[in-house]
Image (cartoon, rainbow, N blue to C red):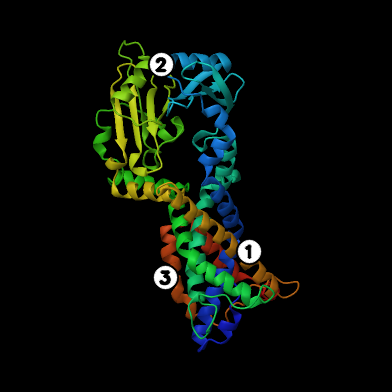
Amino acid sequence: MSQSFAADAENASTPVVSALYRAVWRWHFYAGLLVLPFLVSIAITGGIYLFKDEINGMIYGQLMHVAPSSAAEAKPSELLAAALAKVPGAAIGYMPPPAADRAAQVRIAADSGSTQVVFVDPHTREVTGASEDGGFAGSPLMLTIRHIHSLKVFGWFAERLVEIVGGWAMILVMTGIYLWWPRTQTGGVVTVRGTPGRRVFWRDLHAVTGLFVGIFLLFLALTGMPWSGYWGNHLNTYANAWGFGYPAQFWDNVPKSTVPMKEAMEKTSWTLENQPMPVSMPNGLAPIGIDKAIAIFETLGLAKGYSIDLPGGAEGVYSASIFPKQVAGERVVHIDQYSGKTLFDGGFKEEGLVAKGIEWGVSVHTGQEFGRFNQLLMLAACMAIVLMAVSAAVMWWKRRPKGRLGAPAFPADYRVPRGILVIATAMGLAFPLVGLSMLVMMAIDWLLPRSLRARLA
């Protein structure tokens, strides 16, 4: 939360405190150096993504909305046909009109090679327009924002990078709280002293902002961790294996494929991402078709707003899923495309404790669970993170020696701070990739020649 506490370190009451203080300060500096650029990007894109529904409505409102009519809605098969007549290809998904003034949406793997979403008026069968598929983000623009936010723009390494950035963000908060903790100073604890022209102003602004935003940063880092490639996948596997996901009986006597749900569906819950897709059994029957499938989903009581992934081949299933604002309404249903038999029907209430906690955390993380208040609270946290990062950069610039990095001095006695290795070890064991990156940083810190350390300080 601050990278400029030299005065506090110099005024420490004992050499032991001074050595420990300098060691923590040095690691806080490293953590900031590693993650602040990512945190700024994540905070800005996260703040935008909080309002994805509002932004998508402004951009695509004319496609999504239709004139209300008392006329009966056309059959889903007719709406699929109208969409395919406009955009030739293979239909892979369908969303029934969620309200009387909304268009049906058809996802098509177009012959051109792209994936398109076609909007069809359910009363007139007229296509109101089409756009590039944005997946669960709802639009190509929001999909791009989401990919930047999740660091997916960095390719295959992105899911690992999320874990490293999240872990170092936690280190940033923990070391920052230690540095902020009042010792002999009488100001800069919960108030900001001085004016923008003075270094103390930026020190206090950074420390006080960091204090109040720290709890949110910890929450955002922890709730983002389940989506990381290494730690998140292992947590998912263990949660399901230990009964903290869906109960094992959900899969009893259900024919399964080797394809995970996250690869076969547009959107599924975190708990189900790595679970295998059920498969349909032909048994000499003809496919029931989209009209019959939707009639079954309606009979099962799925709330308006659900979307359907259509069968992908002879063994594919009809998969309906709904993910409303409040996580308690989440539900996923798979039915056999020949018999219409329900193969899987699970929602939030059937999930285990760990799965519920993660799903709830993600819902709050994305500003959905508590409505507008949730959005504005998370937006305020994102803005505070940016302010904290900017104040850190200004503070560093003002205090750095000319021509040098300005890193906190290497402690003269590094024996005392070894106690913090207990915390570091626990962090490394909990998040292995973070632990590995910490070992790398420690090796660099300890093995650097004295001459180079002097240039960095």
Question: Dot 3: within a 10 Å radius of its alpha carbon, few (fewer than 14), some, or many (20 or more) residues?
Answer: few
Residue hosting label 2: 72
Mark 3 sits on what residue? 422
Vertical order, 345 against 360 (above or below) = above
Amino acid type at mark 2: Ala
Between 247 and 91, the one lying in front of the other is 91
Residue underneath mark 1: 390
Please tell me how crowded label 2 is: few (under 14), some (14-19), or many (20+) other residues with Cα within 10 Å. Answer: few
- Residue 41 lies, in percent from the top left, at 60, 53
Secondary element at tag 3: helix
- Residue 55 vs 402, above or below: the answer is above
Position in image of residue 127 (x %, y %):
55, 19
Q: Earlier in the sequence, mark 2 or mark 1?
A: 2
Please say whether residue 348 is visible from this viewpoint.
Answer: yes
Residue found at x 56% / y 22%: 128
x 46%, y 47%: residue: 227
Looking at the image, which residue is at 42% across and 70% down? 422
Q: Position of residue 143 (x, y in %)?
A: 56, 39
User: Which of 85/151 is in front?
Assistant: 85
Q: Is residue 435 visible?
A: no
- Occupied quadrant, residue 419: bottom left
- Quadrant of res 257: top left
Between discs 3 and 1, the one toward the N terminus:
1
Q: CA distance from mark 3 to mark 1?
A: 31 Å
Q: For this view, does 267 lie left or right of residue 52? A: left
What kind of residue is marked 3?
Val
Q: Secondary structure at mark 2?
A: loop
Q: Residues within 10 Å of mark 1 (few under 14, many from 20)?
A: some
Earlier residue among tags 3 and 2: 2
- For mark 1, give the secondary structure: helix
